[in-house]
Image: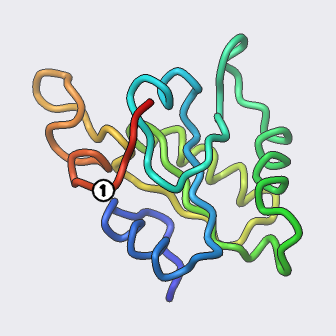
Amino acid sequence: MSYKRNLLPQMALERLKANPDALFVDVRCKAEHKYVGYPENSVLIPWTDEPTWEPDHDAFAQSVLKELGERENILDTEVILICRSGYRSNEALKCLKSKGFNKVSHVASGFEGDLDENDHRGNLNGWRHDSMPWSQG
């Protein structure tokens, strides 16, 4: 399976099913994860969160490494990131790439998707819009 940086929700789900060793990371904040819902089989590692809302590149990369555990060729493990719209997950992707991760991609339309003409999310695209498995609570 060839590496692609930007994935649509269906493609991300297919990659996760095809590669049980892949790590699916929700990079949104804890409140979004709790109140908006989250992709099933994902782990929460916020890119930014309270109280500073500033990304800590080293801490983020270390949290991903910790979640990956003792796998062989750890930096070659496929990591797929998701956020609300694709912006934060792309920033987190750049961080991981700079730390030596080789197979990092993200859901380009995110969990909630792009803004529509009324500045609402969830009507055009995204993980939930495309009926990918998700939970809330």
Query: Of residues 131 and 9, which is closer to you in this image?
Result: 131
Q: Is residue 54 left or right of residue 134?
A: right
Residue furthest to the left in view is 117
Amino acid type at image mark 1: Met
Residue furthest to the bottom in view is 1
Give residue 91's quadrant in the image: top right
Q: Name the residue under label 1.
A: 132
On screen, 55 above or below 112? above
Counting from the top left corner in percent of width and height, residue 55 is at: 71, 30
| Quadrant the C terminus occupies | top left
Q: Residue at x 36, y 71 (%)?
A: 11
On screen, 98 above or below 136? below
Q: Which residue is drawn at 57% across and 58% down?
A: 24
Query: What is the count of numbered marks?
Result: 1
Q: Which residue is drawn at 65% across and 27% down?
A: 48
Q: In this view, does 128 lie to the left or right of 116?
A: right
Give residue 113's quadrant in the image: top left
Counting from the top left corner in percent of width and height, residue 99 is at: 81, 57
Query: Of residues 84 and 39, which is closer to you in this image?
Result: 39
Q: Residue at x 85, y 80 (%)?
A: 72
